[in-house]
Image (cartoon, rainbow, N blue to C red):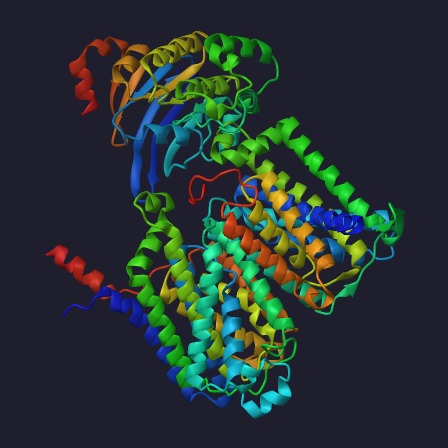
Amino acid sequence: MPESAMIELHELEVRYGAVPAVRGLSLEVRRGVVVGLIGPNGAGKSTTLLAIMGAVSPRQGDIRLAGRSIRGRDTDAISRSGVALVPEGRHVFASLSVEENLRLGLVGRRSRDGVDEDLEWIHGLFPVVQEARSRVAGELSGGQQQQLAIARALLARPDVLLLDEPSLGLAPTIVETVFEALARIRERGVTVLLVEQRAQVTVAFADRTYVLSNGELRATLTPRDAGDTQRLVAAYFA
Amino acid sequence: MDLQTILDAIALGALYALVGVGVALVFGVMRLVNFAHGELITAGAYALMLANGWPDWASIIVCFATVVALALLLERIAFRRLRGAAPATMLVATFAVSFLLQSIALLKFGPQGNNVSVLPGLNRAFELGGVHVRWVTLVSIAVTAALLAGTALFLGRTSVGLQMRAAAIDFRAARLLGVRTNRVISLAFVLGALMAGCVSVLVVVQTPFVSPSFGASILIPALIGVVVGGIDRLATATLGAFSVGFATSALGDVLSSSHRVYLDSYVFLLVILVLLVRPSGLYAPFRRTTVERV
Amino acid sequence: MRVPSGVLQLAAPALLLVAVGIVGGRASPSVQIDFETALVLAAIVISLYCFVGNSGVISFGHVSFVALGAFAAGVTTIPRESKQFTLPDLFPFLQRTELSNVESLLLGAGLGGLLALVVGAALMRLSGLAAGIATFAVLGITHNVLLFWTRIGPGANTLSLVPESTDMLQATLGALIAAAVAFGYGRSRSGRLLRASREDPAAAQATGTHIYRHRLWAFTISGALAGFAGALLVHQLGSITTEQVYLELTFLTLAMLVIGGASSLLGAVVGALLVSGLDSYLGRAENGVHLLSVNVDLPEGSRLVVLGALMALVLLFRPTGITGGREFSLPLAALRRRAMLGR
């Protein structure tokens, strides 16, 4: 059923100068599922997300969003057509208030309807965002900033949410909060592409997980593989 | 210093501040120091000259239209290509564009300069607290105050203003959120151009004479002021430009006539002394490193 | 036999300068002037390169050192008897002083370096962008003082009757000296640290490199070179006004550096020679010439339009300049390496 694919990558190739970062990557993310993308550092995970956002331009291959090619479109246009990225390092606007950061999430939103309801739901996911709304974002802790970044992306009401290592450098309790929130985001029917270093948690959580190494697809795992440490390790170092 | 000296100084400071805001708005979203901002001012003055004989309101509209059109044209054909280039490259590139435009003006209108006049009535004086004050002095101050307040409201209270601030802080992140960066940059150029147009009109009222270096002679001291104040924040950049204008006018009044020819030197010397004492900028709150943020 | 690659990096620009000197020496007298001008401009651009190329900071103030060197060397070499009449307001010690050609070149270098050291001490603390813009203040001061202070120079009048001691030989030697000093600084510890800081200011600071100190050092040396080149210039022209060493020269020399490629000595030399040649051609074309079988008669002032457009185009389409910022290296060496790998 190709029409149910939300994101399709076909033979994607990205290079930084002469260095290939992603080579011939083809994968598919179906509507409403959570797909994990794991692999060692430098495997090309972040580059894949940036390529989908149009922030790096592929040398070859195609990127499709709900069946339509979006390769070569401007980043801001892609973001306004229902794809939101929570970038690595969060990139909240440190000198703006939490509320202003959230308001910037509205820029990518396609419809003005239901903002209040969404806001209420988001505040339910991340109470801290509501509590800190008049503070300057730069004063928040790393975990709070991560929650703000996800909240901001959700306010765009995306069809697809791309997350780049949301648990990086966070305390275990915050990681738990983030994954709980992801579960509820999934319940809402948002398609999620989750880049992570935490292999076991990701494989267990995602409906399907791709293992990337050296810019190539090495293995496809399902939640059943999460307990199979040997298979995980083998896939990782394949 | 009497009231007249102070009012004149505030008025010149206000003009420089308008130039400073225009430059700093564009710098904010693009990290580009636009030397050609001076030629926008020059273009406005030449537009006023070409519209000579028209009713004042009409020539002022022509002036603004010319300045805005030139700003958008430069952004589209030249500066857009420079996005993401090294700061030094951008600096020399806009310097080249500025020089090119000056040369074109030189070729077209000649080096001698031309007479131009708009709203001459504003040069009339009225009495205030025992001193004579020209109307244009008050108008300069009022226009600047209104434009600065308008800019602050626009940036602080509107969604587009918020997007512009976000783009100034983290361009890529703003883009990832869907901020139409081309539009935001164009808007910054348009706002800067509107202020440049105001400067054209206000300066022409006072010195009804335009030559190819008309705008550059205002831009360069204002730009030095922007740098002294601190270019990476709109408020400090504006204050810095204002301070240089204020100091120039006030010193000009204080210096004896034999020293007045060295006014530029005194002002620039003051700037260098200030930088010796406060290398991070006159209005910078504190400084962690000398490493550039960009 | 191995030649250190560093020597080649000096040899290529040096040979180029010598070649221009030799070709120019055989040209007709009317064209010789253009060659001399090209060599003197090359010396100025090399001085600019010495700072800009190593620090990555643009300087709009270098022409102030050129101006200081030119007027100092000019005023001190005009014969005493004519100074009484042409420059009556001069300070008595300047009236009395009459230096030789070489002494005046050294004076130009010394004063240029001194001024650069003094203003650099304040300006080089700024961030790169701000430092570059603030150097405009130096240009403003120098121009303003030279224009009005008749106790040290001609003021708004032309400084004339300066001995025309910069012939083709002196122009060539002068440019070579400038190239050698700039090359030497670039190879020094300070030069290498400064270039490293240009690539990554944060890392340089983290490793304890004092960017300020090295920037100031580079600024001083290049200020001295600029003062020296200014002295060469005044001795080539024989007469000079303050307007000749102001904004137009600032633009022209920056254009040369950028068009050639600001980060290599070769780029500075190639840019200076090429743009200078084009400039001379356009200058003649403004007066109407028959060149290359085309009748050219450009309106006055079009020279600057062409140069401005050229510089803007290079910056927009090839921001690293025509040499791409590379120093000269023999393609042979690369071939040999490849051949060895092949075996």
Task: Name the image quarter holding residue A12.
Answer: top left
Q: Is residue C252 visible?
A: no
Task: Give the image location of residue C282, x and y in percent.
Answer: 56, 74
Q: Is residue B278 visible?
A: yes
Does C186 appear above or below C71?
Answer: above
Task: Name the image quarter holding residue A25.
Answer: top left
Does B43 appear above or below B166?
Answer: below
Task: Give the image location of residue B204, x and y in percent.
Answer: 78, 55
Q: Residue at x 49, y 48 (%)?
A: B279
Q: Can you say which quadrant of the picture contains the N terminus of chain C?
A: bottom left
On the rendered structure, is A22 left or right of B98? left
Task: Give the image location of residue B253, x and y in percent.
Answer: 74, 57
Q: Can you say which quadrant of the picture contains the C terminus of chain C?
A: bottom left
Q: Residue at x 49, y 60 (%)?
A: C119
Task: Give the image location of residue C257, x and y in percent.
Answer: 45, 64
**Observer-nearest of A176 and C270:** A176
On the rendered structure, is C261 left or right of B133? left
Q: Residue at x 69, y 53 (%)?
A: B41
